[in-house]
Amino acid sequence: MTINSKQKGSRSERQVAKILREHGFTDARRTAQYCGNTGDAADVIGIDGYHLEIKHQERTQIWSWIEQAQHDAKDGEVPTVIFRQNRKPWMVCISLEDFLDLLNKQAD
């Protein structure tokens, strides 16, 4: 990974954490990932029950990203990929099962 790619990734993680805080998730913050290993593999933490992987890349590799989120998620966490390309909106990818669970909780 080049320095520019690393900086872009870090910037994107901070941006997503800021957006989450602005929407009331006050504990959202980027993890300090030194050498890619902190013991907490999520890119952004502070959203209980969710493992957040943040990707800002022009070439979408969604299945690879999903597999990473699934592999790194702790038991009980929803593997979640938040991603975008330049000049495009942020998107969120979760499984249909997890999406249905969200809808059902909202209906209660």
Image (tube, rainbow, N blue to C red):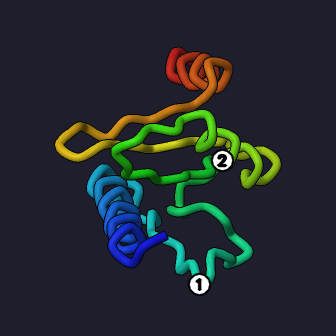
Q: Residue at x 60, y 17 (%)?
A: 100
Which numbered disc, 1 or 2, marks the residue that appears first in the sequence?
A: 1
Q: Residue at x 59, y 44 (%)?
A: 65
Tag 2 secondary structure: helix
Q: Is residue 94 left or right of residue 29?
A: right
Q: Residue lying at the far front in this picture: please name it.
A: 2
Q: Is residue 50 above or below residue 106?
A: below
**Count of residue discs:** 2
Label 1 – label 2 distance at C-alpha: 18 Å
Q: Residue lying at the far bottom in this picture: please name it.
A: 34
Q: Which residue is mark 1?
A: 34
Q: Amino acid at mark 2?
A: Ala
Pick whichever, 56 or 3, lies toward us.
Answer: 3
Q: Is residue 5 above or below residue 94?
A: below
Q: Is residue 96 above or below residue 90?
A: above
Mark 2 closeness class: few <14, some 14–19, many ≥20 residues within 10 Å: many
Mark 1 closeness class: few <14, some 14–19, many ≥20 residues within 10 Å: few
Query: Residue 37 appears in which quarter of the rendering?
Result: bottom right
Pick whichever, 76 or 52, lies toward us.
Answer: 52
Q: Position of residue 78 (x, y in %)?
A: 66, 40
Q: Position of residue 12 (x, y in %)?
A: 34, 61
Q: Quadrant of the C terminus?
A: top right
Which label belongs to residue 69?
Answer: 2
Which label belongs to residue 87?
Answer: none
Q: Residue at x 45, y 69 (%)?
A: 29
Q: Position of residue 90 (x, y in %)?
A: 31, 40
Pick whichever, 75 or 10, lies toward us.
Answer: 10
Q: Amino acid at mark 1?
A: Tyr
Q: Residue at x 61, y 47 (%)?
A: 50
Q: Residue lying at the far right in this picture: please name it.
A: 75
Tag 1 secondary structure: loop
Q: Is residue 100 left or right of residue 91?
A: right
